[in-house]
Amino acid sequence: MNDYMNNFRLDGKIALVTGASYGIGFAIAKALSAAGATICFNDIKQEFVDKGLANYEQAGIKAHGYVCNVCDEDAVNALVKQIEEEVGVIDILVNNAGIIKRIPMCEMTAAEFRQVVDVDLNAPFIVAKAVIPSMIKKGHGKIINICSMMSELGRETVSAYAAAKGGLKMLTKNIASEYGGYNIQCNGIGPGYIATPQTAPLREVQPDGSRHPFDQFILAKTPANRWGEATDLGGPAVFLASEASDFVNGHILYVDGGILAYIGKQP
Ligand code: NAP
Ligand code: GCO
């Protein structure tokens, strides 16, 4: 293999991808595995972890699955300790686990707002805080936070999610600033609109067989004129997890088909 391309390899590296039984996390984990990484992932329930393990096995990947709610700091610290004992020190963290609640702000309860922020912002803080000390000892580390279009833009009904993902963008920059000197690079990936269970409600075929209005809206806003696939995120994740990006720090890499660059197709 061309020696330069070895910079994109992850052989010997251990990756923790949170919430990666399916969806974007699963696609990113598959790509990291294809580049040589050993995959660890978690989900909230054993049932989902088991389904995830089956998905990885079907993809020919021997992953390590754990039950852990990323909002629970004690559980996260125990998870990282268990991974270090059973698999090894985590070289790559992908903070992927996330939820969204689509509720008009004035109808959203404070508890619902806090729940979204807890998973989408507080948890990435908790998990990053748990893995950084060992990364410092090891002399390197990669942290990739899964941000969003809503790290830059707002829209109706996603106030909590946008606040959390906007905060996650700045947490990414702050981790990069605070720990870059330890050879830890912290960057974000900002997916556009990706076809996963999380966005399924936005793509439901209408009773008359037409596309969901939001589906049509996104196609008009996307130069690529398509929804993203979770697999579109694999290459960017491998790049940010690899030595090829050792001088990239505090950057949010938008993988959005051009949405953020485009005013939108004229109706
Ligand atoms: P998804 O299909 O809803 O999957 C989310 C995953 O996170 C699930 O495996 C879920 O586990 C897990 N999770 C949720 N809360 C958790 C918790 N407290 N502890 C542990 N795991 C938890 O979402 P996705 O579309 O793959 O999105 C993944 C990430 O990308 C999220 O951060 C999302 O905000 C972000 N994102 C998505 C899009 C998109 O268009 N899809 C675009 C930009 C950013 P359970 O199955 O147990 O709930
Ligand atoms: C929504 C969508 C988006 C995507 C993604 C876009 O309701 O607007 O769920 O928020 O999930 O975050 O980048």
Image (cartoon, helix red, strand yellow):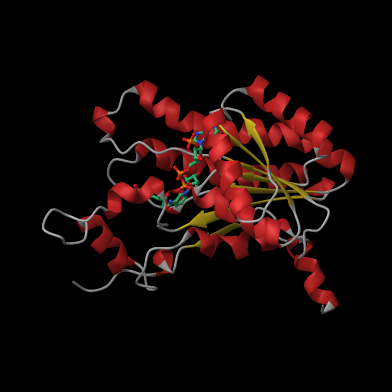
Residue at (44, 32) in percent of width and height: 116
Q: Nearer the viewer, residue 81 or 138?
A: 81
Residue at (52, 51) in percent of width and height: 24
For residue 13, side relative to residue 122 (left or right):
right
For residue 47, side relative to residue 130 (left or right):
left
- Tell me where residue 212 sits by quadrant: bottom left
- Compared to residue 60, the image places residue 170 above or below, namely above
- Tell me where residue 6 sits by quadrant: bottom right
Total labels: the figure holds 0
- Rendering coords of residue 2 (x, y %): 82, 79
Q: Residue furthest bottom?
A: 2
Q: Nearer the viewer, residue 156 or 142?
A: 142
Instruction: Specify the quadrant that holds the C terminus.
Output: bottom left
- Rendering coords of residue 14 (x, y %): 77, 47
Residue at (35, 38) in percent of width and height: 159
- Rendering coords of residue 154 (x, y %): 35, 48
- Rendering coords of residue 62 (x, y %): 70, 48
Instruction: Tell me if I can see residue 208 in this picture.
Output: yes
For residue 239, side relative to residue 133 (left or right):
left
- Compared to residue 137, the image places residue 112 above or below, namely above
Instruction: Tell me if I can see residue 170 in this picture.
Output: no
